[in-house]
Image (cartoon, rainbow, N blue to C red):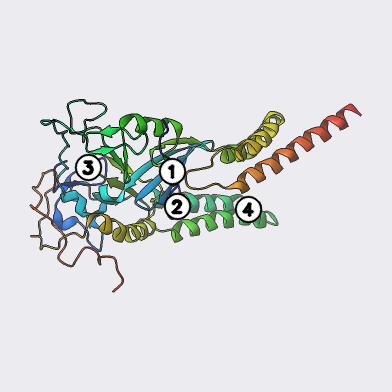
């Protein structure tokens, strides 16, 4: 008895890399699913999120980018101090170090504010570490939206009575599909 | 989580966010944690969970029965082994109908790529072996040959699920050979 072989799907890499000390995480777009690849440099772990199962993708802003900005600016300033104290040619040497820190600061600013993104299915909520910048997360969501809509069908657009929860309370969500009145699919399209 | 309820993505908050927070063009401020949040909800959120299938009991003669459940009516055949399967035993995997045994075989033999959750990627391992030990350079006496061996071995093993990248193995072999050449030169100089 032999199990049938499957066709190898073709994957397209989505922008973004999530890193920590020991692992790197990437997101790939498959024919009918998202593939999250976690690599430790020797082996890879795979998590698949099928388009038909994705219920929500949500992110919240984080302060990691601002912390990095402060760190790089502080290091640039500290790099200049000894140069100014010693004077003469030392300012050039320490100036070069300061320019490196300033370049990193510029790159961090250019990449945009940071966020933490989560994907929800019926049975789990998983963090997507590669989507750690807001512009990148929005770009990927824009790319995924039509694919998910094709797999699941469009959200019916019904007007939603505006309501905001009080902090600490648990408001009852509106019954039925609560898509925004302006239409879900076009919410990020350029106007 | 019930249908119609999406919690704040901030793991320290998890306050259920109502519909007017969903699919908005701009991020909204969560009233629970004061964090700016963006929530994109899709229609699967409103679908009820599909009901589990049950196998039909055979009530008449001349009807094929399931290989695994004698009293249950066969509804399809396994694409792996050809055995008759009832609705309970039929596992639909991307259009293929498999029995639990063939499904398990597919997973253990790595024949169905969508069932793989872990894989050793030898080309990446070879490059890691070639590069990282340079930080602790005496170790390259051992890791250099290992990188070359691992790089060569990677040509005979499947690459990443996302595609094979032979340049990694080639780089690892070149760097590993360079390390070996360096050690050889060091030993020759030490002897003479």
Alpha-carbon distance for marks 2 and 4? 49 Å
* Residue A37 numbered tag: 1
Alpha carbons under labels 3 and 1: distance apart: 21 Å
- A184 over B79 or under it: above or below: below
**Mark 1 touches mark 2? (CB < 8 Å):** no
Q: Mark 2 vs mark 4: tell me if same chain.
A: yes
First-in-chain label (3 vs 1): 1
Residue A189 x %, y %: 29, 69
Foreground mark, 4 or 1?
A: 1
Looking at the rendered image, the quarter that the N terminus of chain A falls into is top left
Task: Chain letter for mark 3, please.
Answer: A
Looking at the image, tell me whether mark 4 or mark 1 is earlier in sequence order: 1
Q: Residues within 10 Å of mark 4 (few under 14, many from 20)?
A: some
Give the image quarter of residue A121: top left
Left or right placement of residue A132 versus residue B145 in this view: left
Q: Which residue is disc 3 drawn over?
A: A122
Task: Using the rendered image, report if marks 2 and 3 lie on a common chain.
Answer: yes
- Mark 2–mark 3 distance (CA, rounded to whole Å): 26 Å
- N-terminal label among 4 and 3: 4
Chain label for disc 4? A
Residue beneath label 2, please?
Answer: A10
| Residue occupying the far right of the picture | B192
Q: CA distance from mark 4 to mark 1?
A: 40 Å
Residue B100 higher or lower than B22, as above or below: above
In the figure, residue B1 lies in which quadrant? Answer: top left
Q: What residue does disc 4 label? A: A94
Front: mark 4 or 3? 3
Side of B168 relative to B42 (left or right): right
Q: Earlier in the sequence, mark 2 or mark 3?
A: 2
């Amino acid at each position: 008895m032999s199990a049938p072989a499957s066709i190898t799907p073709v994957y397209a890499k989505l922008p973004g890399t999530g890193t920590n000390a020991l692992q790197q995480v990437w997101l790939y777009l498959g024919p009918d699913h998202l593939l999250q690849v976690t690599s430790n440099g020797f082996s890879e772990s795979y998590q698949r999120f099928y388009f038909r199962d994705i219920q929500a993708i949500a992110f919240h802003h984080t302060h990691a980018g601002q912390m990095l900005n402060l760190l790089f600016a502080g290091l640039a300033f500290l790099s200049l101090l000894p140069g100014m104290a010693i004077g003469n040619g030392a300012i050039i040497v320490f100036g070069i170090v300061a320019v490196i820190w300033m370049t990193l600061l510029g790159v961090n600013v250019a990449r945009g504010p940071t966020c933490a993104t989560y994907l929800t299915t019926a049975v789990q909520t998983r963090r997507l570490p590669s989507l750690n910048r807001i512009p990148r997360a929005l770009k990927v969501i824009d790319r995924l939206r039509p694919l998910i809509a094709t797999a699941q069908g469009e959200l019916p657009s019904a007007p939603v009575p505006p309501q905001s929860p009080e902090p600490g309370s648990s408001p009852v969500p509106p019954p039925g599909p609560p898509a925004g009145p302006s239409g879900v699919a076009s919410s990020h399209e350029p106007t | 989580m019930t249908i119609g309820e999406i919690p704040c993505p901030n793991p320290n908050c998890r306050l259920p966010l109502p519909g007017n927070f969903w699919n908005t063009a701009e991020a909204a401020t969560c009233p629970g944690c004061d964090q700016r949040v963006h929530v994109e909800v899709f229609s699967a959120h409103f679908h009820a969970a599909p009901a589990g299938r049950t196998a039909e009991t055979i009530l008449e003669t001349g009807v094929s029965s399931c290989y695994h459940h004698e009293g249950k009516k066969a509804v399809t055949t396994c694409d792996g082994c050809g055995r008759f399967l009832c609705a309970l035993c039929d596992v639909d995997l991307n259009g293929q109908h498999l029995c639990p045994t063939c499904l398990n075989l597919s997973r253990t033999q790595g024949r169905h790529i969508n069932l793989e959750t872990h894989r050793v990627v030898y080309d990446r391992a070879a490059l890691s072996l070639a590069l990282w030990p340079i930080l602790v350079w005496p170790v390259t006496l051992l890791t250099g040959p290992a990188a070359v061996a691992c790089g060569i071995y990677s040509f005979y093993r499947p690459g990443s699920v996302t595609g094979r990248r032979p340049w990694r193995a080639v780089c690892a072999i070149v760097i590993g050979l360079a390390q070996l050449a360096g050690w050889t030169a060091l030993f020759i100089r030490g002897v003479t």
